[in-house]
Amino acid sequence: MRLGRRQFLGGAVALGATALIAPLARRAGAQPKFSTSPFTLGVASGYPLPNGVVLWTRLAPSPLIPGGGMSPDVVIVDWEVASDDRMGQIVRRGTAAASPAWAHSVHVEVDGLEPGRWYWYRFRAGSEVSPIGRTRTAPAVNASLERLRFAFASCQQYEQGYYGAHHRMAGDNLDLLVFLGDYIYEASWGRDHVRHHGAPEPFTLEDYRIRHALYKTDADLQASHAACPWIMTWDDHEVSNDYADDRSEQAHPREWFLERRAGAYKAYFEHMPLRNYMVPLGPQMRLYDQVTFGNLIRFHLIDDRQYRSHQPCVGPGRGGSTVVEECADRLDARLTMLGEVQERWLDASLDRSRARWNVIAQQTLMAQLDRKVGPGQQFWTDGWDGYPVARRRLLDYVGNRKPANPVVIGGDVHAFYVADLKPDFDDPKSPVVATEFVGTSVTSQFGRSQQAMDALRGENPHLRLANGAHRGYVRMDVTPKRLTAELRAMRSVTQPRAEVDTLATFVVEDGRLGAVRA
Ligand SMILES: [Fe+2]
């Protein structure tokens, strides 16, 4: 019998993997023996609900070889959730099937937990036991929540630095981590590498699995996953630089590129604590979602890669981005960043939210960034500046419908930005409709001098801060009255576990748009 994906991933997990998977696994030999631990990639959790959370691991005793060092059998993995950090009081347990078809990854949607509290979890395969992870459920729907502490981060090119930012986030006692894309990089680039991918650019599913596995072998990244639940979206480098929907930067044949994308998306799913319904179908994978924490905060996570129009203004036979001055195609009203279905979903998610804070978690800088100092304007077309009509439509919507305290967070550009978001950035009278924070990169390099960044602020008065001098992350402390954002700057990424400083702190007061420097 061939199991449908719904039965396999959804049904099996919901039934505690007893009915469907047990016979299969018995045939395959359910008690594996490992000569080394298969838990080399750590554990993770994500997408908290009031009664549960997603738990993840992957069995890979030799993570950097095809197949991860596993034999091609289905393996039964036991999981347990405890109310204490020593796993003394087990509150939920069950089994899940780790299938070679999914790189022996495990996604367990635990339910039956209490809202708004910490839990600990681990896995067992054969006689091997995983490290213990810590996770937290969301508060009950509309329950009052007095505080949420989260961090957001993006862009972690492995060769360009150590994950000191993850080491720090793991120690920040966060309730949640929001990752905004470029979790892996497909390409080797940049200078002063501290370590190496050790493999060429990935193209196949197996290549992408090995790239994800390499990144996940990092102890600081594992610690950051084990410290709290994550929610996430992706950007281009999870597949390839500057791709847009079905078009690669090099404008490869569409079918070839979609096959590559399918492998990349599948490997992404296999390595992240994602909800089972997100499981990819070929080159399609629904990643956008909302996650709500009581009456305090709703995260609207969006995907601006999979459904976007091709970037405008590139030459014939090319895809990807460019920097343009005059190009009427950029203003084409048909250009979309989210696609029509997701755009309608986002509108509805904002309208239905009863949370005090509405965070739109997305990939890149949303504010306009005129890159040309002096007369005239120059825009980079891979960001929202390539899709200004779509941006205006979203910001007009936010301005008209007025969801409570809209805050946009982003990554991608390897620099900190704090901005006022306005429907028309060229009109000084255009109202501020949302507040934006863009985190810098965990490690990925930035090419512009601070002097050049300061000059950009003169061209773009809606920017309250622009700083590309540091790698790091943003830490947020949210209460009903205010949101406090600390821009956390690592002193070094070429030294493991370097010190971190707060570059600046900004506050957004409830009911006021725009961040004020504290
Ligand atoms: Fe990046």
Image (cartoon, grey):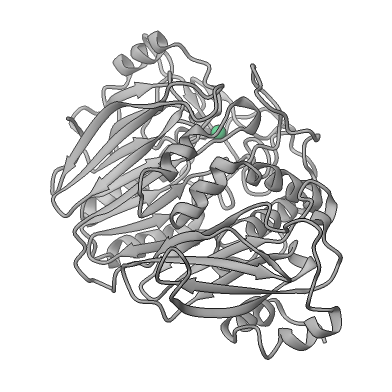
Q: Nearer the viewer, residue 150 or 426?
A: 150
Point out residue 9 in the picture as x, y percentages from the top left corner.
65, 76
Q: Is residue 62 visible?
A: yes
Question: In the shown orientation, is residue 478 left or right of residue 383?
Answer: left
Find residue 273 and report its image quarter: bottom right
Of residues 333 and 233, the one drawn nearer to the viewer in this rendering: 233
Q: Is residue 226 left or right of residue 292?
A: right
- Residue at x 45% of width, y 33% of height: 385
Q: Quadrant of residue 281?
A: bottom right
Q: Residue at x 76, y 50 (%)?
A: 63
Measuring from the top left, give residue 334's x and y in whole percent.
50, 47
Q: In which quadrant is the N terminus drawn?
A: bottom right
Q: Can you give x and y, in whole percent of width and height, for residue 163 in the image?
A: 54, 34
Relative to 113, residue 261 above or below:
above
Can residue 431 be seen? no
Q: Nearer the viewer, residue 451 or 309?
A: 451
Q: Position of residue 150 (x, y in %)?
A: 35, 49
Q: Quadrant of the C terminus?
A: top left
- Residue at the far bottom in the pictured view: 19
Which residue: 38% across, 67% down? 137
- Relative side of 314 to 481, left or right: right
Residue 171, above or below 357: above
Q: Where is 288 relative to 202, above or below? A: below
- Name the image quarter holding residue 102: bottom right
